[in-house]
Image (spheres, rainbow, N blue to C red):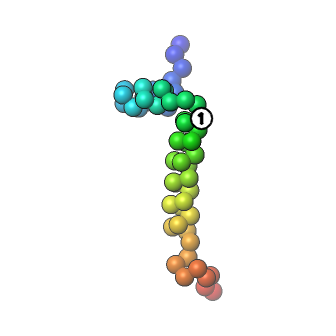
């Protein structure tokens, strides 16, 4: 039974390129993507004036 990973769901060439990356590069890619989503979410949640209103 073949183990299916998230990389198996990607288009062929992209999957091959990601598999060829060294483990540290994959880790940094994950950190960058998580940081991108976290930063964009935090930017949306910040008040426009920088102060809280009552």
- Residue beneath disc 1: 24
Q: Is residue 4 above or below residue 45?
A: above
Looking at the image, residue 31 lies above or below residue 37: above
Q: Residue at x 59, y 35 (%)?
A: 24
Please state, as top left, top right, bottom left or bottom right, where the C terminus lies in the image: bottom right
Q: How far across and down, in percent of the image, does residue 46 sit?
A: 56, 72
Q: Is residue 13 above or below residue 33?
A: above
- The residue positioned 55% from the left and 68% from the top of the image is 45
At x 42%, y 26%, the residue is 16
Residue at the bottom extreme, as displayed = 54
* Up/down of 24 relative to 1, above or below: below
Q: Residue at x 52, y 27 (%)?
A: 5
Q: Is residue 6 left or right of residue 23?
A: left
Q: Residues within 10 Å of mark 1 (few under 14, many from 20)?
A: few
Q: Quadrant of residue 22?
A: top right
Q: Position of residue 36 (x, y in %)?
A: 51, 54
Quarter of the figure with residue 47: bottom right
Residue 44 placed where, x, y %? Answer: 51, 67
- Secondary element under disc 1, as helix, strand or loop, is helix
Q: Nearer the viewer, residue 31 or 7?
A: 31
């Amino acid at each position: 039974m073949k183990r299916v990973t998230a990389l198996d769901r990607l288009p062929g060439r992209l999957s091959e390129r990601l598999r060829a990356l060294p483990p540290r590069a994959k880790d940094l890619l994950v950190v960058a993507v998580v940081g991108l989503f976290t930063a964009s979410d935090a930017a949306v949640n910040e008040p426009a004036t920088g102060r809280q209103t009552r």
